[in-house]
Image (cartoon, grey):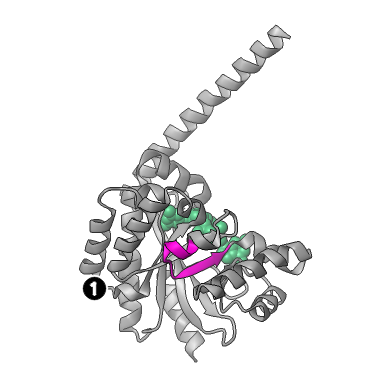
Amino acid sequence: AKTQQRAGYFYFSRNMGVEIRERVRMMHALRNAFSQNELFVMYQPQVDLQSRHPVGAEALLRWRTRDGKFVPPDRFIPIAEYSGLIVELGEWVLRTACKELVRLRAAGHLDFTISVNVSQVQFRHPQFLSMLRRALDDSGAPPAFVELEITESMAMEEPDMLIEMLNQVRQTGVKIAIDDFGTGFSSLSHLQRLQVDRLKIDRAFVTEITGSSRGSSIAEMVIQLGRNLGLSIVAEGVEDERQAQVLYHLGCPLAQGFLFARPMPADELSDWLAGEAR
Ligand code: C2E
Ligand code: CA
Ligand code: CA
Ligand code: CA
């Protein structure tokens, strides 16, 4: 038993070494990619479920390496967070998205909101608020059409500090959405104290909606919760028409997903919007 334990230990620690080395390698590659302009932002439209008209888009970070390979954000975002690079990257995404919003407004899309993901590391940074104000000022983006997405897991930590921080963020005029909603355990009373504008129903519950009745009951619960609190609600990851129908009948006003549009580069977004307006 003893040797087995030892073998287990060595196996484990060797893998740890590999994992850490891989992370460090990725971290350098990411830093390099950022300075070499290998990173860019794609936009995925969000639509009104009744009219199917676009109401906004979520900015999603992309990394295409020089040999044309895409590294998925689920792989590099955790590394950016771990290394702290997310602070710089997140600022760049926000600034890029604000500029895009200004461009879209100049093209006549005045009722259109851009949503930007904000990671916990970024949000907790002491300069987050001043960074946000500068990004808004420099770009001239109207704050009411900029939305920050924070995750539900983040919304559950240190309530008092978070409430204070959210109040300050909202004073800039930007909107706040809770992303991946339904995956955590926020209570009604907690949510009430948080003063957010929107809930995004996690894709997992949208996927389940046309399957088991238990799945649809979670989405249904989130929609009811949002409606009771007077919040806007977006369902994410809507892939087929049946899901869209069920969500609409459950009272979900907005949706995002491959059924409507995939994430696209900025220039395609303006074309797509022009097409939708016709
Ligand atoms: P998320 O914020 O939950 O973003 C939604 C993800 O669902 C996106 O994945 C999007 O491409 C994908 N998606 C949208 N519609 C559908 C659908 O109908 N079916 C399926 N299967 N997937 C759909 P993506 O772009 O790979 O991003 C993954 C995650 O990486 C995001 O999840 C977010 O947590 C993170 N992320 C992306 N960009 C940023 C960023 O700029 N900053 C931060 N902090 N995180 C980011
Ligand atoms: Ca998001
Ligand atoms: Ca999400
Ligand atoms: Ca998600």
Mark 1 = which residue? 140
Q: Nearer the viewer, residue 223 or 23?
A: 223
Q: Is residue 65 magenta?
A: no
Left or right, 109 with reference to 276 = left
Image height of 77 relative to 108, above or below: above
Query: Looking at numbered disc 1 in the image, what kind of residue is underneath it?
Result: Gly
Q: Quadrant of residue 235?
A: bottom right
Q: Position of residue 154 (x, y in %)?
A: 46, 51
Q: Residues within 10 Å of mark 1 (few under 14, many from 20)?
A: few
Q: Position of residue 115 (x, y in %)?
A: 42, 67
Report the residue at 75% width, 69% height from top. Answer: 210
Report the residue at 69% width, 79% height from top. Answer: 245
Would residue 26 be visible to someone looking at this image?
A: yes
Q: Nearer the viewer, residue 155 or 269?
A: 155
SS under mark 1: loop
Image height of 104 relative to 175, above or below: below
Report the residue at 32% width, 77% height from top. Answer: 103
**Total labels drawn:** 1
Quadrant where the image shows the N terminus: top right
Q: Position of residue 146 (x, y in %)?
A: 36, 70
Q: Residue furthest right?
A: 212
Q: Nearer the viewer, residue 256 or 106?
A: 256
Q: Residue furthest front?
A: 189
Would residue 62 be visible to someone looking at this image?
A: no
Left or right, 174 with reference to 245 = left
Report the residue at 49% width, 85% height from top. Answer: 275
Q: Residue furthest top?
A: 2
Image height of 187 relative to 49, above or below: above
Q: Position of residue 78 (x, y in %)?
A: 47, 44
The span picked out in magenta is 191-201
